[in-house]
């Protein structure tokens, strides 16, 4: 299994404003990640007992907040997930049909985040 | 997870879970049910008659963009015989409204619908940029909300007068959402229609999904003067939106209240007086817009906001003769202009 996966990320509905005003991004994340969604694992080798899981959408949300988001994290994330009013699509399918945060990411998946809160 | 088949056609892959029903449906079935539900309620509520000129308040935002697209689609599919046009208000907000108007202009071409743009500047002699430079950001939403309401009615009336036919105004007050708290101010105004409706998140999802899958072109930036555009109070912001944000036409149409609204207007129009200065509907001698405009013109903008400031203005004497006023409002003759709004 490859150690990293590449993902296509798209933001819409005004959410792109929090991400350098770019709608499309390509990112690479580890395929195995800490279960606690820590996106900055300590370099200390004594901490290698940390529990891991396959990278899922929940982890991706943390990753985007920690590494891609430029401002106002509270408009993107709330209570360990995306803020209410943000729709998520996984390969053009409503994430509610794909297990939401528990969906295990595959190489080259496309994840779209759209805010419904901006602009009627 | 294995892909699920659509609950309606049992065939294609489901792409959406409907918030209202939990049904999992495919893209084509989603388009069909979304459009058909709007059609059914238009029929039930008897919203339109053949030959009606229907103005769609177009902000460039998602609600009015979806509304324009769906109405155009249904008008062709079911032969409503409607004459649709887009009506946009240019508040004069550099870097915000000028961008969203570009979206509306693209919509005009994409949907081949005529577009009328009416600006605060031509109507009131003030842009929002100028108003904010005089009064600051604190009460600017009050001005914007009041001015906008009249501008839409006046825009519709002008168009109706051009062709002397009944205008049925059907407005999505989409972009007020971007003005955040403005909505709650507007809803308490002297308006003929009660504009506040409970927020229905369910419809937001379908509207945004519809726009996404149809690849509709819409504009989604906060108004630069919105008090919430700068603050990080996500929770307050969300609460505000939940309490007071305009949703889509589906809300009002689905709620079956569109018909009630129509009746309500007829009833209120009889008892309402008109503004002595500009002829617009008003519950006082002067309508809100005239009051606000006088304050601006006399350099005492707060007089439109608080009673104390109003008294101070009155103490300065009557309005000068050469005061800038709003062109006299000619209410539509025949059947009233119906402003059906999709305020959630
Ligand atoms: Zn289907
Ligand atoms: Zn007036």
Image (tube, coloured by chain):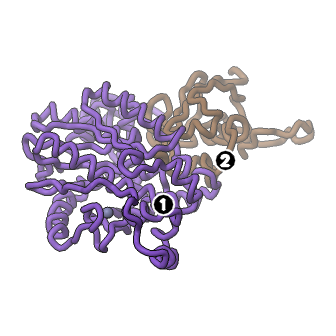
Chain colours: A brown, B purple
Q: Which residue is mark 2?
A: A73
Residue B245: quarter of image: bottom left
Whether tag 2 and tag 1 are in contact, CB under 8 A, the answer is no
Q: Residue at x 49, y 55 (%)?
A: B180
Q: Which mark is residue B296?
A: 1
Is label 1 in a helix, a strand or a loop?
helix
Q: In terms of image quarters, where does ligand 1 lie?
A: top left
Front of the two marks 2 and 1 = 1
Is label 2 in a helix, a strand or a loop?
helix
Percent position of residue B299, x then y: 53, 62
Circle 2: is it few (<14), some (14-19), or many (20+) Cα within 10 Å?
A: some
Q: Residue at x 28, y 38 (%)?
A: B86
Q: Residue at x 55, y 53 (%)?
A: B132
Position of B53 with respect to B205 (left or right) is left
B86 is higher (above) or lower (below) than B308: above
Q: Nearer the viewer, residue B33 or B313?
A: B313
């Amino acid at each position: 299994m490859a150690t990293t996966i590449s993902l296509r990320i798209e933001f819409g509905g005004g959410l792109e404003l929090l991400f350098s005003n770019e709608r499309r991004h390509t990112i690479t994340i580890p395929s195995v990640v800490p279960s606690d969604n820590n996106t900055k694992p300590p370099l200390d080798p004594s901490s290698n007992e940390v529990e891991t899981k396959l990278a899922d959408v929940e982890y991706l949300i943390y990753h985007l907040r920690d590494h891609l988001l430029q401002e106002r994290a509270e408009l993107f994330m709330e209570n360990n997930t995306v803020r209410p009013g943000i729709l998520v699509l996984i390969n053009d399918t409503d994430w509610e049909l794909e297990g939401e945060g528990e969906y295990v990411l595959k190489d080259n998946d496309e994840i779209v985040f759209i805010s419904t809160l901006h602009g009627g | 997870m294995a892909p699920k088949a659509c609950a309606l056609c049992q065939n294609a892959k489901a792409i959406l879970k409907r918030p209202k029903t939990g049904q999992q449906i495919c893209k084509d079935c989603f388009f069909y049910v979304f459009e058909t539900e709007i059609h059914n309620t238009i029929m039930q509520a008897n919203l339109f008659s053949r030959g009606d000129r229907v103005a769609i308040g177009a902000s460039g935002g998602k609600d009015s963009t979806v509304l324009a697209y769906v109405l155009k689609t249904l008008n062709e599919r079911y032969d409503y015989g409607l004459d649709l046009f887009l009506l946009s208000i240019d508040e004069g907000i550099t870097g915000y409204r000028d961008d969203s108007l570009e979206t509306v202009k693209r919509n005009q071409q994409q949907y081949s619908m005529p577009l009328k743009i009416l600006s605060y500047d031509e109507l009131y002699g003030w842009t929002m940029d100028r108003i904010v430079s005089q009064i600051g950001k604190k009460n600017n939403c009050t001005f914007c909300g009041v001015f906008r309401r009249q501008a839409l009615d006046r825009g519709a009336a002008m168009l109706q007068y051009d062709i002397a036919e009944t205008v049925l105004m059907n407005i999505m007050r989409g972009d007020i959402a971007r003005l955040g708290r403005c909505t709650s101010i507007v809803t308490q105004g002297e308006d003929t229609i009660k504009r506040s409706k409970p927020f229905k998140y369910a419809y937001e999802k379908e509207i945004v999904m519809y726009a996404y899958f149809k690849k509709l072109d819409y504009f989604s930036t906060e108004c630069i003067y919105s008090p919430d555009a700068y603050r990080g109070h996500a929770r307050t912001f969300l609460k505000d939106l939940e309490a007071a944000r305009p949703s889509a036409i589906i809300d009002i149409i689905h709620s079956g209240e569109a018909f009630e609204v129509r009746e309500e207007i007829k009833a209120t129009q009889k008892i309402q007086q008109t503004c002595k200065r500009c002829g617009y509907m008003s519950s006082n001698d002067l309508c809100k817009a005239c009051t606000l405009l006088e304050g601006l013109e006399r350099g005492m903008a707060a007089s439109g906001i608080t009673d104390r400031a109003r008294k101070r203005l009155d103490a300065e004497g009557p309005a000068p003769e050469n005061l800038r006023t709003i062109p006299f409002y000619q209410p539509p003759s025949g059947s009233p202009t119906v402003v059906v709004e999709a305020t959630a």
